[in-house]
Amino acid sequence: MSAGQEDVKNSAASDPRKLRFGEFEVDLDSRDLRKDGRLIRLQRKPFQIMELLLQARGRFASRDELTRVLWPGLHVNFERSLNTAVNSLRKALGDSSQNPSYIETRPGLGYRFIAAVEEVRPGGVGASSGANQNCAKARYFLNKQTQADLHKASAYLQAALKEDSRCVPAYADLVETYCQFALMNMAPPAEMATRARPLAATAMELDCNCAEARAALGRVRRFFDWDWAGAAEAFQSAIALDASSAAVHHAYGCFLSSMGRMREALEELRVAQGLDPVSPAIHVDTAWALYLARDYVAAHEECWKVLTLEPSFSAAQHVLGLVYEQMEMCDEAVIEFQNALTSGDEQPAVIAALGHAWAKAGKTTEADDTLGQLECLAAKRYVSPYWHAVVSAGMRRDSAAVEWLKKGCEERDVWLAWLGGDPRFDELRCAPRFQEVMLRMNLESTRSGAEPTEIASHLRK
């Protein structure tokens, strides 16, 4: 018997027999696995694997160890049977070997259970702060900014609220998650608004003096209500309540950048970076703010800060491509957009960026192809009218671009919050019909009043 097996055996009597992780609850005595109270059928061998991994969580269980536990005393090659059992367990948990939420595979080491696990005591009270653990894990996935990771963040936050229905940070982070759903075109903005508003209201009702609750209210006012003054007030009050929150400074900085208040925006984003220096999302949004400020050199530097640490971070590749286009480096821009598309998310924002770059390079056929891609994608999922407008503006189909923007107004598209500053619409800004859209949103053209060198200098202070 291995040392790992001995540890599991010796601790089995004292190990908790009912455990909860994510949306699942397992009773090791009755050998029940349930998801949201619904029984999940799991055969004996996959259940044994789950039990061993749960009891040995925090370390890797080798394939040899698992084989000896599942088929004791037998000296036969069970490699294929073990693979089948592990795959059955993953299927029951809805897990993926490529992007695991529960079972991590490490060649040469074995398998490890990676989700937060808590004991279920009589009365349902957890031995540890399960809600806080789930919120922390959700924050990690929120920062990764992919569709798959946003779904994981949502699942962890839902689990946190099942653990503690009065967990204000979980309500607030769900608001942020649904805003990200809307920004990444994972659902229509009206649907996300319907979900986010009551969550922000509940957070405020539970604790109106909580910074996260105020920030959630600010996000709803910003993205779904287009209440710019109300959003500013909510973010400012959040910072007054907790000046040490990187997430709050980050949110306020992004809002200020969309309003064209670049020096203030970069100050908030610089504070957020100081509080959370390894957050790729904060660095990418700083690069986006510099792009809106037309400080392309500083934006380029900020993108590479992210890509040095996360070479495949698609959001940074996307912004870097936008920067290259404005620097008239079309070939480099196209490469970065194509790199960003390899994430598999089929982001309309990146497809549109590629189309705009092709159009500005005079490659009308390729630009038209991206419009076709957006149309095909719209048959499967929500696609913001903003992205059709971006490509149309690049092709100087000004009337079509404005019509798409009007459609975006009707749908209350969240991306229109940046309409005042996006450089891709600069050639349209003086057009009366474009100004009508701006007026309808109560926006002004927000091209930065600061010179690029001044803004970059301010960021580096």
Image (cartoon, rainbow, N blue to C red):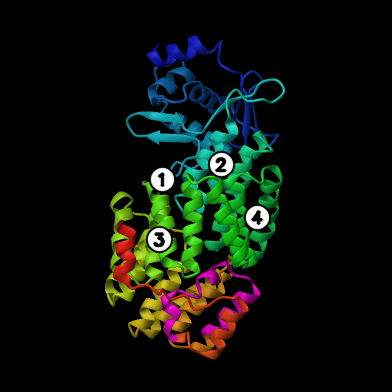
Which mark, by number, is residue 266? Answer: 3
Judge whether residue 31 can be spotted in this image: yes
Query: At 43% across and 35% down in the image, what residue appears?
Result: 104
Residue 56 tag number: none
| Chain-order first, disc 1 or disc 2 | 2
Circles 2 and 3: CB atoms closer than 8 Å? no
Circle nearer the N terminus (3, 4): 4
The quadrant where residue 62 appears: top left
Whole-angstrom CA distance, mark 4 to mark 1, is 26 Å
Q: Which residue is mark 4?
A: 196
The kind of residue tagged 4 is: Ala
Q: CA distance from mark 1 to mark 2?
A: 35 Å
- Would you name the residue on which mark 2 appears? 94
Labelled pair 3, 4 in contact (Cβ < 8 Å): no
State which tag comes first along the sequence, 1 or 3: 3
Q: CA distance from mark 2 to mark 3?
A: 41 Å
Q: Could you tell me the amino acid type at mark 1? A: Leu
State which quarter of the image contains the N terminus: top left
Q: Which residues are magenta?
A: 401-427
